[in-house]
């Protein structure tokens, strides 16, 4: 600090982003089902967009957005988030906004529990609306299939509640997918999972589901080829029999 004409003047110094960031607070997810549910969303989006490198998706990763947040150790790690129009090939321990040209998540999903529901629909929702300006925000409790809720940011930068369609799905405008429930077994746990569906209503598959689907399609194509070949042979045999009935020698034709 310098003093001139009895006036205190604060020396200017450039703002230096915090560097002492941590990326793991040692806190586990609520349950094994929460962990699976998070990975289902991440891995199915990666599978669907396997040919794209213009996005990043992660979960249970800290998002750093201000020095005040770092100072207060106010960690924020959405269970699922996606950021569009970024280099998806970069390796990241967390999402550090000032290292990402100011980009915040475009879509966030929080997997609630009875102990976190109020925060997820209160403090976090306000943060994602007012600070992150995240376009689409959803909450879902993996133990409550009727808990799905969502909001979309309107032109006034305010969240508007989304309305469930006839299938009880919600439209995620930024990703171009529906979010809805699906009952089945994943990683040896049977539950009603939150899944993505495409515009046509088809389930967005996990990598292992896509591999099975490819194998089944290959088997079906082979069976169809065999059936066509058998049908061709049968037609030829029927034609030969008919010619013999007419007194013709099919081997001469």
Image (cartoon, rainbow, N blue to C red):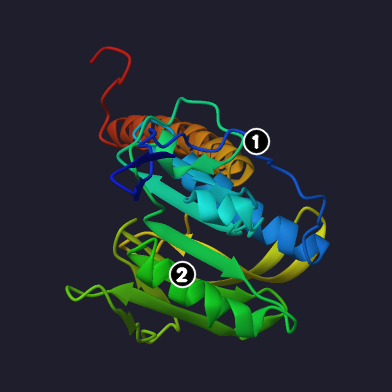
Residue 149 x %, y %: 48, 82
| Quarter that holds the C terminus | top left
Give the residue number, with chain letter if any, for mark 1: 20
Q: Residue furthest top?
A: 252
Nearer mark to the viewer, of 2 and 1: 1
**Mark 2 and mark 1 residues within 8 Å of each other at the beta carbon:** no
What is the tally of numbered marks visible in this picture?
Answer: 2
| Image quadrant where one finds the N terminus | top left
Residue at 28 percent across and 45 percent down: it is: 5
* Residue 76: quadrant of the picture: bottom right
Residue 179 in sight here: no
Q: Nearer the viewer, residue 81 or 1?
A: 1
| Disc 2 secondary structure class | helix
Q: Where is residue 51 in the image (x, y as percent from the top left)?
A: 38, 30
Locate residue 236 relative to residue 190 in the image: left or right: left
User: Can residue 173 be seen in this snapshot?
Assistant: yes
Vertical position of residue 175 compared to residue 225: above or below: below
Report helix, strand or loop for mark 1.
Answer: loop
Q: Residues within 10 Å of mark 2 (few under 14, many from 20)?
A: some
Choose between 18 and 24: the one closer to the eye.
18
Location of residue 222 with respect to 158 vertically, above or below: above
Residue under label 2: 127
* Coordinates of residue 171 in the picture (x, y in percent): 34, 71
Residue 75 place in picture, x, y as percent: 64, 57
């Amino acid at each position: 600090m310098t003093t001139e004409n009895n006036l205190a003047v604060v020396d200017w110094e450039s703002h230096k982003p915090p560097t002492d960031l941590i990326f793991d607070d040692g806190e586990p997810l609520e349950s094994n089902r929460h962990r699976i549910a998070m990975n289902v969303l991440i891995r199915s989006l990666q599978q669907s967009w396997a040919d794209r490198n213009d996005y990043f998706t992660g979960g249970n990763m800290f998002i750093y957005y201000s020095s005040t947040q770092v100072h207060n150790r106010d960690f924020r790690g959405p269970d699922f988030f996606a950021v569009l129009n970024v280099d998806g090939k970069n390796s990241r321990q967390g999402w550090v906004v000032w290292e990402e040209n100011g980009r915040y998540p475009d879509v966030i999903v929080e997997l609630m529990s009875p102990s976190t529901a109020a925060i997820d629909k209160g403090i976090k929702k306000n943060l994602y609306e007012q600070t992150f300006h995240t376009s689409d925000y959803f909450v879902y409790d993996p133990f409550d299939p009727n808990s799905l809720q969502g909001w979309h940011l309107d032109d006034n930068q305010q969240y508007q509640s989304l309305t469930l369609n006839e299938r009880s799905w919600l439209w995620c405008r930024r990703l171009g997918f529906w979010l809805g429930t699906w009952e089945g077994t994943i990683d040896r746990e049977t539950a009603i999972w939150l899944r993505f569906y495409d515009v046509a209503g088809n389930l967005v598959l996990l990598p292992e589901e896509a591999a099975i689907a490819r194998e089944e399609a290959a088997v079906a194509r082979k069976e169809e080829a065999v059936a066509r070949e058998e049908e061709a042979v049968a037609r030829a045999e029927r034609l030969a029999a008919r010619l013999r009935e007419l007194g013709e020698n099919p081997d001469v034709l």
